[in-house]
Amino acid sequence: MCGIAGIFDLTGRRPIDRALLTRMTDSLAHRGPDGSGIHVEPGLGLGHRRLSIIDLDGGEQPLFSDDGIIGVTYNGEIYNFKELKEELTADGYVFRTHCDTEVIVYAWAKWGEDCVRHFNGMFAFALWDRNCDRLFLARDRLGIKPLHYAVLPTGWLIFGSELKALLLHPDLPRAMEPTAVEDYFTFGYVPDPKTILKSARKLAPAHVLTLQRGRATPVPREYWTLDFEPRSAGEAEAGEALIEGLRRSVEYRLMADVPLGAFLSGGVDSSAVVAMMAGLRDDPVNTCSISFGDPKYNEAAFAAQVAARYRTNHHVEQVEPTHVGLIDTLVKAYDEPYADSSAIPTYSVCGLARKRVTVALSGDGGDENFAGYRRHRWSAHEQRVRSLVPQALRAPLFGFLGATYPKADWAPRYLRAKTTFQSLAMDQLAGYLDSVSIFPDYLRRRLFNASFERELQDYRSVEVFRHYARSGPEDPLSLVQYLDLKTYLPGDILTKVDRASMAHSLEVRVPFLDHHFVEQAARLSPALKLKGREGKYILKKALQPYLPNDVLYRPKMGFAVPLPEWFRGALRQQVRETVLGARLEGTGIFASAQLRRLVDQHQAGIHDYAPVLWALLMFDGFLRQMEGDAPTADATALLRPAAMAN
C-alpha cells in the first residue's frame, strides 16, 4: 500500500515547485515507508511513497511505460493483475517488472479510460498520458482507497491520498464548508465527495476524473453501479455459491511477498474470513483481537473460540480509558473531523497486527452486503408500518407521539419508543437518517447557533440520502443497503480502517468487498438476507459448517467503545474542559447553552450523549491541529465557514 500526491497545471506548463511536491509526498510517509519517488516535468509533478508488498525489488514509482509516454503513481492492489498481464503480453506489451503497477500503464494503453472496468482490486491512482496531454484520476468501486483533490484559484490542481498533503499547499483556501459541518454532526464523518473544506473534494468511489490543459475542469464520471435486481436461487444453491465466492475472494487477497494475517473480532464476518484463510493455507493464520475490561463490549472470548478452532497464532490487546489520549494521534491520522469512536480499538489492533505482519485481511463489508445491521431490520419493519397508514394520518399521529413520549435512555429497550414514533412520522429516507445519526435533527438544530443556521441556508443532511436514492433500488431493504454502500461504508468504515492501518504502515484487504462478490450478494433476494429478525440469514446458514453457533447467532455487539462510562468517570473532567472551552466557543458555530446542557445531562446520567460529545472532542482536536498548521496568524478566521470568515 502506498501514498500518492501530485500537482498539475490546468492552464499551461508552469514550472513545478519540486520542494513543495516533495513535502506533500513526504507527509504521506506513513503510507509508504519503504521508498519514495518524484517525477517533475513542465506543468506536472507526481509523487509516491511505497509500502513494498509485491515485487519487493522492483515496482518503484512513479512508473512509466518503456517509451516514457504513460506514467502512473498508484496506491492499492490489482488482484487480477496476473491474468491482465497475460492478456496484455499476448497483445504485444512488454513488462519489465513483476508488480501490478505496470499493468495499469498498459491497460490504459489498450483500453484508455475503460481500463478501470478491467481491474479487480482496491486502488486510487493518477495516470499521465503525454500523448494526449491528459491526467486521469481514478478510485476503486467501493472506495477502499482514498483520493483527495482541489482546484486552486491560481489554476493548479493538486491531489493526494490524504487531505494533509493538500493542506501543505500555501494557495489552498481553508474556509470550512458549512454543509460539511452539518453532515459531520449528523453522520460522524463528512460523506463523499465533500471534505470539511470548501476548496477540496474527495473523488467518490467508482468515479474517474479526466483533466486536460486549457479545458474547464470536468465533473467526475461514474464507471460502475450496483444492480440489486434479485436472481432466483434456493437457499442451498445460494449458500454454496456464497462460500465459493468468498473463498475465491479470500484466495485472491493472499498474494503477498511479506507476512500476512487477519483481524479477528469474534463477529461473523472476520471469523468467516479466518475460516476461509485457514482452509487455503498450510501454515497457521496470524490473528489479532482487541478486548475491553467491560464485558458489555468485550468479544474477545468469541474470537478466542474461533482462533482455537482453526489453531491460529492469536494475539490480544486490551483497550483502556487512557487510550482516549489517542485523540491527537487520531486527529492527525484522519485530517478532517471523524467521530467513530471505534477508531480507538481499530488503531490499536492495527498497531498490534503490524508487529507481526505487513498485510491483514478484515471482515468489513459483510453487514452492508447482507443486511446485518439492526437498523436494517428496523427500517424494513417501519416501512411496512408506513405502507399501512396513510401519510395524512401517519405524520400527525406519530409526530405527536414522538414529541410527547419521554426520551428514556436509561429504560429497557422496549420502553424506548420515542425515536420509533419520530421515525414513523417521517418518510423512509428521513427515518433511516434518524437511525444512523449520531445526533437527531431536532437536537442538532439546538446545537448550532442562529448565525450558523443561516449559513446552512436550510440545508439538511437528509439531502445526502435523497441524492443517492434517486438511482437506488425500489425495495425498501435493498435501498437502505444501497445507501450504506454509498455513504457509511466509504465515509466511515473504510476511512476508519484505511487511516488507522496506514498510520502503522499496514495494508488491509477486504474480501467481502471484492466487487464480484458484492454484485453476487446484491442480486440475492432480500428475503434471503433478512428473515424474520435474523439479518445476514443466508450467509450465517452457509457458514454453519465453518463456525460455531455461539459466533453465528449471538446478539451483534459491533466494535464499540465504552464511552458513556468513560465520560462519566475517568474522562469526566477532560470532556467538560474541552466541550465548554474557548476553542469551540470561538468557532461561532455552537450554542453555548446547549453544549453545557449536553455535558451536564450526560454526566448526571439523564441522557446518553456520548456520540455527540465524542464528535465535539474530535472537532476540537481538528481545530487545534488546523490552528497549528495555519499559514497565517489569523487561524480562527480561516477555520470558520466561508461567509463567517469574510
Image (cartoon, rainbow, N blue to C red):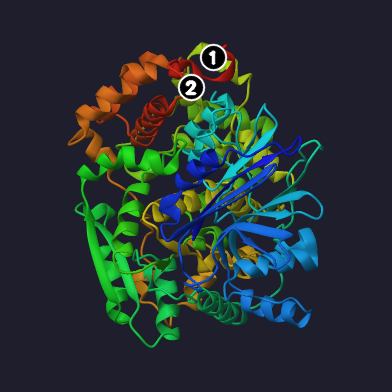
Q: Is residue 523 visible?
A: no
Q: Amino acid at mark 2?
A: Leu
Which residue in the structure is indicated by mark 1?
645
Question: Relative to 210, does residue 170 appear above or below in the rendering?
Answer: above
Real-space Cα separation, disc 1 to disc 2, in angstroms: 8 Å
Tell me where residue 509 appears, x and y as whole percent: 48, 65
Q: Are marks 1 and 2 in contact (CB under 8 Å)?
A: yes
Category of crowding for the residue at label 1, using alpha-carbon neighbours closer than 10 angstroms: few (below 14), some (14–19), many (at least 20): few
**Residue ranking furthest to the bottom:** 282
- Residue 574 occupies which quadrant of the picture? top left
Tell me where residue 334 appears, x and y as whole percent: 44, 42
Residue at x 37%, y 14% (from the top left corner): 592
Question: Relative to 271, does residue 388 appear above or below in the rendering?
Answer: above
Total labels drawn:
2
Q: Quadrant of the C terminus?
A: top right
Q: Is residue 132 visible?
A: yes
Q: Is residue 17 left or right of residue 579?
A: right
Which residue in the structure is indicated by mark 2?
639
Tell me where residue 546 appears, x and y as whole percent: 41, 81
